[in-house]
Image: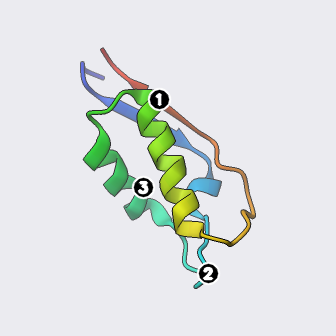
Amino acid sequence: MESGDVLVAYTDGVTEARNADDQEFGEASLQQIINSLAHMPARELSERIVESVREWCGDVPPHDDLTLVVMKVK
């Protein structure tokens, strides 16, 4: 890894989170968030990912945990 690289490790609860239409959040949505917010500090990126997943789910209760680790190389 090189300076500026971002590593996001996550459990399936992140990408398999479902909304009211029973659609998964998915890897593509996660990748889009990471790509657009990679410039943020790791803690903020992590918080934005969780916030995005929760917004996606809306009022649907989670069926799994949201666990992730975000690391940035200095």
Q: Is residue 73 above or below residue 29?
A: above
Which secondary structure, mark 2? loop
Q: Which residue is mark 1?
A: 43
Q: What's the residue at 61%, 71% (across, down)?
A: 18
Instruction: Give the class, few, some or many, for how many residues have Cα within 10 Å of label 3's Cα (few <14, many ≥20).
Output: some
Which secondary structure, mark 3? helix
Its colouring scheme is rainbow
Q: Is residue 20 above or below residue 56?
A: below
The amino acid pointed to by label 1 is Arg
Which quadrant: the C terminus?
Answer: top left
Direction from residue 61 to residue 54 in the image, left or right: left
Which secondary structure, mark 1? helix
- Mark 3 and mark 1 lie on one chain; the one further toward the N terminus is 3
Foreground residue among 35 and 59: 59
User: For residue 20, which numbered disc appears in the image?
Assistant: 2
Measure how far apart labels 2 and 3 are at the Cα level: 18 Å
The amino acid pointed to by label 3 is Leu
User: For residue 68, which numbered disc appears in the image?
Assistant: none
The amino acid pointed to by label 2 is Ala
User: For residue 30, which numbered disc appears in the image?
Assistant: 3
- Mark 2 and mark 1 lie on one chain; the one further toward the N terminus is 2
Residue 42 x %, y % = 42, 28
Which quadrant: the N terminus?
Answer: top left
Measure how far apart labels 3 and 1 are at the Cα level: 16 Å
Residue 53 x %, y % = 53, 58
Direction from residue 31 to residue 23 in the image, left or right: right
